[in-house]
Image: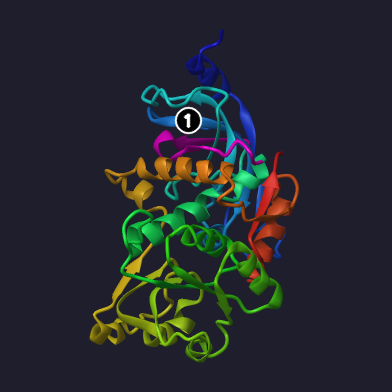
Amino acid sequence: MESPSHHLITMQHQLMKAVGVYKALPIEHPDALVDLEVPVPSVDAFDLLIRVEAISVNPADCRVRERKIDDNQFAILGWDVAGTVVAMGSNVSAEFKPGDTVYYAGDLTRPGANSEFHAVDSRIVGHRPSKLSASQAAAIPLTALTAWEALFTRIGFSWTEPNRLKTLLIVGGAGGTGSMAIQLAKLIPDLRVIATASRPESQAWCRNLGANDVIDHFGDMQEQLLKLGLSQVDAILLLNTPDQHFPALAEILSPQGTLCSIVPFNTGPDINSLMRKSATFVWEFMFTRSMFGTPDLGAQREILNTVAKLIDAGQLLSAATRDLGAISAKNLRIAHGLIESKRTIGKLTLTGF
């Protein structure tokens, strides 16, 4: 039987298909994303080499593409993956073996996974849900990790202990992270979940995922909350256009409440507006652990494994809504364009080469 290390040495002399970017261009430009053949990546001691079966596209992909400097270097994007282990580094734990089906979001400081093969640190990889296709599984990792860390690590909700915070407003509930956040929040005992969405179809999506109430973030949110019998909310998860929404959210947030944002501001917000309420503002950036190699790096594997169990138990659903076909520059340009339109619901995926 061929050993994983021998298989790895053999593959590293091969080329693979990949999709990436040389320089920032409008997504309508035919060279905004390009097809190329590049060497199969080498792996470090803790790495897995993954045969990529499906990917999902996120706003993070668009932001990285838009900021790519013109240095004549080919950058591979893609940070949502479902695939199969084909080889392993020398320090990978016994939890993994070749042939395992896995899913993960990856590391923003390393090449992305829009390629036939991808090297990733095993400590941020989970065993994917057994009841989902590769396409459905690829839609989960980045959004599940972001929503989980925001709700349980940053805001501090608990499944097992009484929660001081009783109401949660999710701004941008119909996107990928919002879709997962609604579902995870509904598993928290006695928590009232209010989502925002601006179109009838996106509002219906949020309700179907379990939101107790849905309001329009382009309308007067405080007035809409009053009609629901709420003058304020205890926690807010801000998932889009923070510059536009922050002033209103600062008024809506209850004293000693918590506001967590996953999106950077274009201009500095007036954090002082939270001072008189002794309210907390906290960031969630899913790539922090992998980017800085934090001591709790392996927590992301544990989260993904837990999410997989919840999905297989029927307690969570994949937010995959549309598969755009094979992983190619043409189809990825379509995906980026749809995301940049800010009108997508759920997650876009691509499958195979």
Residue 193, can we see it?
A: yes
Is 166 a magenta residue? no
Kindly indicate the quadrant of the structure image that contains residue 36.
top right
Q: Nearer the viewer, residue 312 or 250?
A: 312
Q: Quadrant of the N terminus?
A: top right
Kindly indicate the quadrant of the structure image that contains residue 121.
top left
Q: Position of residue 166 (x, y in %)?
A: 38, 71
Picture residue at 52% right of the left edge, 48% below the top: 141
Residue 26, can we see it?
A: no
Mark 1 highlights which residue? 48
Q: Position of residue 224 (x, y in %)?
A: 53, 88
Q: Quadrant of the C terminus?
A: top right
Up-down: is 83 above or below 328?
above
Which span is picked out in magenta? 116-132
255 lies left or right of 35? left
96 lies left or right of 322? left
Count residues near mark 1 (Cα–Cα under 10 Å), then give few for <14, some for 14-19, many for 20+. Answer: many
Outermost residue on the top side: it is: 1
